[in-house]
Amino acid sequence: MKQAYSIGIDIGGTKTAIGLFDSNGYLLERVQYPSDKDAEPDVFFAKVAEQCKKLLTTKRIGLDDIDGIGIGVPSFVLFEQGRIIKTSNLTKIKDFPARDYFASCFDKPVRIVIDNDGHTGALAELRHGAGKGFEHMLFCPVSTGISSGIIINKQLFRGSYGWAGESGHMLTSPDTGISCGCGNRGCLMSWCSGSMIVKHVEQKIAAGEKTLISTLAAADEAISTVHISEAWEQNDIIAKQAVEQMAQYMAIWLYNLYVTLNINCFVFSGGLLCMGDKLFKRVRELFDSYNDNEYPVYFKTALCGQDAGIIGARELLY
């Protein structure tokens, strides 16, 4: 029987990863490169297509041997049309017919499915990871941004237009704080995501507040959550305040999701997991303080690792 391959693409605000899979879903090859935040959408997706072509050429696989290409993006996606409405961490990618444009980059027809990366991660963990065995699940990536993928009755819930689960952009304090790429000020993501907490710290440094974070980062523009975490371990006041702020808004985010959907399984993935107990122990404490009943709520860590995005993107095809 002829081998049928598939490709899964995980586009993020920091990196883009591409995976080639065999018919059994086994990952054969993975390539990765930095995402260009300044690229126009056609240039950005043309590069992704070129990387796919190179991967197929290297493996001596033709488009006729491909079942399809699944793509996860950190965007509001009008799913049925395959159109990206806006992308908070790649702000130039907006109002763009991504699926149709991407298809035009190939010289033969190929099936393409594009969806939000919270959705692709949810599919990966439901079918292959920490969500196996649960009827309902919330997949919650916590990294450059925060969002959720909603699984109900083992099916992905997309909502009316396709962007159900963009919960990081729920408003908690409208018109206050720092502007988010979603176009609002005061959304949850603007208070507690990896990229935005750095901006809050930078504001304090610009106002003249002293912190070890500046020394650890060597230059203010190089500050990351790694430096905040390191400074926290040295009892730096600004770092302590930053982590507490993240914990408070994450707990509000998760509790609101819980009481809205009554889904008791949260699966977390993303770069902020490296903060470990200094962040997530506090998130759990605050969540439990809001949740005044004895019924269990599970906080689980994703099991698909760095390949969750490409695995889930591939799962869009099946």
Image (cartoon, grey):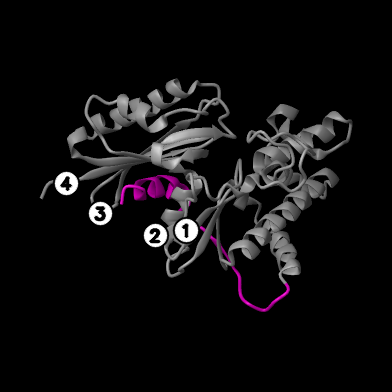
Q: In this view, does 173 lie to the left or right of 123?
A: right
Magenta residue span: 292-318
- Kind of residue at badge 4: Gln
Circle 3 SS class: loop
Check disc 4 and report the residue beneath it. Answer: 3
Q: How far apart are marks 1 and 4 (CA)?
A: 27 Å
Foreground mark, 1 or 4, reads 4
Residue 14, image x, y percentages: 54, 34
**Residue 104 picture quarter:** top left
Label 1 with label 3: CB-CB less than 8 Å: no
Which numbered disc, 1 or 4, marks the residue that appears first in the sequence? 4
Q: Residue 24 carries which label?
A: 3
Is 40 drawn above or below residue 138 in the view shown? above
Q: Which residue lies furthest to the front in this view?
A: 160
Amino acid at circle 1: Leu
> Label 3, label 2: how many angstroms apart (C-alpha)?
13 Å
Observer able to see residue 125: yes
Dot placed on the residue nearer the N-terminal end, 4 or 2: 4
Residue 190 magenta-highlighted: no
**Image label count:** 4
Residue identified by numbered label 2: 128
N-term mark: 3 or 2: 3
Q: Answer yes or no: do the residues labelled 1 and 2 have beta carbons within 8 Å?
A: yes
Tell me the number on the disc at residue 303.
1
> Which residue type does callout 3 highlight?
Asn
